[in-house]
Amino acid sequence: MARFMRAASRARRFCLCAALCASVLSCGGGDSGLSPSGSSGSSGSSGSSPPTGANVVGVVVDAGPTSTSPDINTLFTTVTVCVPGSTTNCQTIDHIQVDTMSYGLRILAPVLTISLPVQPASNGSSLVECTAFADGYSWGPVALADVQVSGETASSVPVQVIGDPNFTSVPADCSGVGQAEDTVAAFGANGILGVGVFAQDCGSGCVSVVDNQVYYSCTSGSVQCQPTAVRSLAGEVANPISYFTADNNGVIIQLPSVAAAGAATVSGYMIFGIDTETNNKSGSQSVLTVSSSGSDAGDFTTVFNGQNLTTSFLDTGSNGFFFNDTDITQCTDSGFTDFYCPASTQSFTATLQGDNGVSVSESFSVGNTESIAQDDAAFGSLAGTFPGPGSSTTFDWGLPFYFGRTVYTAIQGSVTSVGTGPYVAF
């Protein structure tokens, strides 16, 4: 049976190891605070007048949550979680990856120091989720948390606790997706904040179908978990933005441009809400509506090399441009064989076309992955092939697309001055 999980990203969420030669599948980084201030060798925040307000939080591209194996092109922010109803039993967690192509907050159990209440499945056992990403899977129970990001708060949000040691029996139809990403080292972040165009991570399919291959009913320590339907949409892991009392119809990511040679860090902003405050007004950006249902939910079309790539998307959770072009030289180093390594940087043009017929021509560059400096966390021309099923119809516009732009993501059904979500705009 096809998995009901809406497209989750993190395609090629690889890091650059210290010597650029070891395995790119094991990522990590240090425990530095996140602030939108520049430093030597960094790109500063975009715009001459930085946005301010309770709905604004700093985001940063840096080496990640440990120093042993730096991330590249991974966007982080800081989130506070509390036991529901408490103002003291709380924890602030940095290096939470920001992902515009997944939905919901997921926290790595090893970094979580508070105990969040696990939610029951319909039969009274614990509700546990398998999150399938493009490069692996994460397994863990669904819990409730009050979530705060900057001045925005959301109460009793269903979140996933990844790698909870009380739930170690992973069903074969989950573990068969790929490698496990249940530790900070494997995940490359302390968690992930999915702020894409949907309010829930699966939708009605996981409510109406028992064997949805996403949600399971498990007893703590049990050797076997059973597939289960979620009792209602409200029980699914949810995009916290949809739970905000205000500024809850979408998100804006604002990042500066990056020099061709790369940058050690890049700092910018995430602004909640669209047309809800003076600091998040729509302007003259191009609005591309995306598919609202089906296997291509969240997608638009990219026209590239004479092909209509109908499952294309904008994605801060992918660290490069990912598409297939046999004319571009691929890397020969064993750690980078799925990435492109042309002898010199190549420039291309593609057309992004929304379901509403709006088309925008965009230029992008593909550089040599093996030439990235080992101390750079941001590189604007990182690119590679797209993996797995659907690769022939996919163009993944990852984080490099966001450099030097202000990009809007509107949640399905939400109304803004330029249209109703789901849409992306830039």
Image: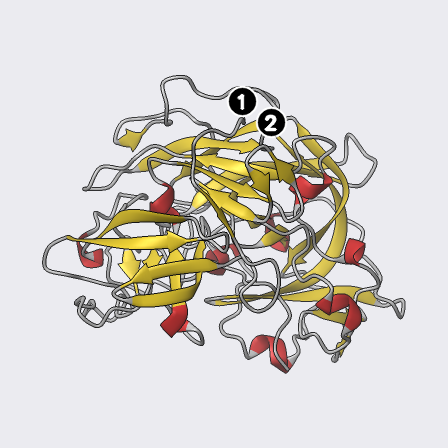
Q: Residue lying furthest front in this view?
A: 357
**CA gap, disc 1 and disc 2:** 9 Å
Name which residue type carries label 1: Asn
Q: Tell me if residue 157 comes above or below residue 283 in the rendering.
A: below
The quadrant of the image that shows the C terminus is top left
- Label 2 crowd (10 A; few <14 / some 14-19 / many >=20): many
Mark 2 secondary-structure assignment: loop
Name which residue type carries label 2: Asn
Residue at horizontal 41 percent and vertical 56 percent from the top: 27
Contact flag, marks 1 and 2 (Cβ < 8 Å): yes
Residue 363 spot, x, y in % from top left: 25, 48
Res 81 quadrant in image: top right
Describe residue 240's horizontal placement relative to residue 393 as left or right.
Answer: right
Mark nearest the camera among 1 and 2 is: 1
- Please give the residue where the numbered disc 1 appears in the rendered image: 279
- For residue 224, which numbered disc appears in the image? none
Q: Residue lying furthest right in this view?
A: 124
- For residue 55, which numbered disc appears in the image? 2
Say whether residue 193 is visible.
no
Residue at horizontal 75 percent and vertical 44 percent from the top: 145
Mark 1 secondary-structure assignment: loop
The quadrant of the image that shows the N terminus is bottom right
Describe residue 278's horizontal placement relative to residue 323 as left or right.
Answer: right
Residue 253 spot, x, y in % from top left: 47, 37
Which circle's residue, 1 or 2, is located before the other in the chain? 2
Describe residue 274's horizontal placement relative to residue 346 as left or right.
Answer: right
Residue at horizontal 70 percent and vertical 74 percent from the top: 212
Most foreground residue, 217 or 389: 389
Describe residue 354's horizontal placement relative to residue 333 as left or right.
Answer: right
Res 56 quadrant in image: top right
